[in-house]
Image (spheres, helix red, strand yellow):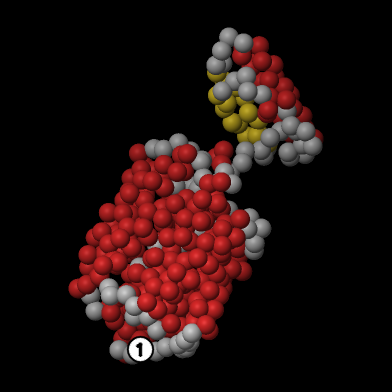
């Protein structure tokens, strides 16, 4: 099918997008030079004739260019800035306190309040998450004494996560996101309830605790799977990674949160760069990400300052609640 001749014209710089029966015509409204006047009138007439013809034929999209998701992104407004700063701070505080990226809470904000299409919001969320996890690592790293085994575990998971996150971001439009979302939700519910139980009953459990090569192989497999899910859903993956560190590698809750943040750095960086390279993050969307990321950084400082004063069981109970709430947020986020 062809497009209208004006769809590829660069004679005019400003267009007004108007919808007619599901058909979008780009009509030039302002000339950028004296040579644009004639072309503007000609292209406008062609647009109206072809759009009208499309309505009569009732054949959507036959000749008229549809607006893409990116075309629908609106410029920055005071409301957008206020929402970005407010929710950025709140999710940043959770990231600094627990060690999660907060993406499950930001995506509904980006989709429902800011109007970003879900697949584009995922890329923006990864950029914001990069601000959050970087500062979270910086603020929390000195609060622990690290063993060689923990550092090797972090390195293995971090390297593998780069490939997994890039693959997930590349396949976001092709991989079935709905089944993946329900699998992640089931995982979050089970782990969240179990963590609440352990926090209330003052218990500690470890499912397995492999050693040697088996430990690194398990770490690679787990990290890759979580990174793919993170790239598809557009989240840092801390809600999935921290329980794995707790129950599969016997890492204490506070250290697990910091290790998860460290692994999240290459995860969200790889996903965000892939989305930017593929053109899913426009300059306007990048500005929203920077604003929300800056507010998240302030929130991280606030949340991380509370970590040393809280008992591990309190943090585990809070994480359990966050996992359950994150499940609700993922479930109700519209897929569009």
Q: Percent x, y for residue 11?
A: 62, 19
Residue name at image x 55 percent, y 16 percent: 32
Residue name at image x 60 percent, y 63 percent: 177
Label 1 sits on a secondary structure element that is: loop
Q: Nearer the viewer, residue 173 or 146?
A: 146
Residue 321 in sight here = no
Q: Is residue 226 above or below residue 13?
A: below
Residue name at image x 41 percent, y 53 percent: 128
Residue name at image x 27 percent, y 62 percent: 139
Q: Percent x, y for residue 169?
A: 57, 57
Residue 291 placement: quadrant: top left
Residue at the top extreme? 34
Name the side, left or right, on which 46 lies relative to 165. right
Name the side, left or right, on which 27 lies relative to 130. right
Name the side, left or right, on which 114 lies relative to 3. left
Residue 27 in sight here = yes
Q: Is residue 36 above or below residue 309?
A: above
Q: Is residue 22 above or below residue 309?
A: above
Q: Is residue 244 above or below residue 333?
A: below
> How many neighbours does mark 1 have within 10 angstroms: few (below 14), some (14-19), or many (20 or more)?
few
């Amino acid at each position: 099918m062809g497009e209208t001749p004006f769809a590829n014209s660069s004679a005019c710089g400003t267009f007004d997008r108007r919808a007619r029966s599901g058909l979008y015509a780009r009509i030039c409204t302002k000339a950028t030079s004296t040579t644009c006047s004639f072309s503007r009138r000609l292209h406008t007439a062609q647009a109206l004739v072809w759009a009208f013809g499309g309505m009569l034929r009732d054949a959507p999209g036959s000749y008229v260019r549809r607006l893409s998701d990116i075309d629908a992104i609106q410029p920055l407004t005071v409301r957008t800035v206020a929402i970005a700063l407010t929710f950025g701070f709140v999710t940043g505080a959770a990231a600094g306190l627990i060690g999660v990226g907060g993406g499950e809470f930001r995506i509904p904000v980006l989709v429902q309040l800011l109007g970003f299409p879900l697949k584009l919001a995922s890329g923006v969320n990864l950029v914001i998450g990069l601000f959050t996890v970087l500062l979270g690592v910086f603020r929390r790293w000195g609060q622990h004494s690290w063993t060689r085994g923990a550092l090797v575990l972090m390195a293995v998971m971090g390297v593998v996560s780069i490939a997994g996150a890039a693959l997930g971001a590349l396949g976001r439009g092709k991989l079935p996101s709905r089944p993946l979302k329900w699998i992640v939700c089931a995982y979050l519910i089970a782990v969240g309830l179990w963590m609440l139980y352990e926090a209330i009953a003052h218990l500690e459990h470890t499912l397995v605790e492999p050693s040697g090569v088996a430990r690194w192989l398990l770490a690679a497999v787990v990290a890759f799977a979580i990174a793919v899910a993170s790239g598809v859903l557009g989240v840092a993956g801390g809600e999935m990674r921290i329980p794995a560190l707790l129950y599969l590698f016997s890492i204490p809750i506070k250290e697990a949160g910091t290790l998860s943040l460290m692994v999240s750095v290459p995860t969200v960086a790889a996903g965000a760069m892939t989305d930017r390279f593929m053109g899913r993050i426009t300059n306007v969307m990048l500005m929203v990400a920077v604003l929300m990321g800056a507010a998240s950084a302030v929130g991280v400082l606030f949340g991380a300052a509370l970590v040393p004063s809280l008992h591990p069981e309190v943090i585990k109970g809070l994480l359990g609640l966050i996992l359950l709430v994150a499940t609700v947020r993922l479930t109700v986020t519209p897929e569009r």
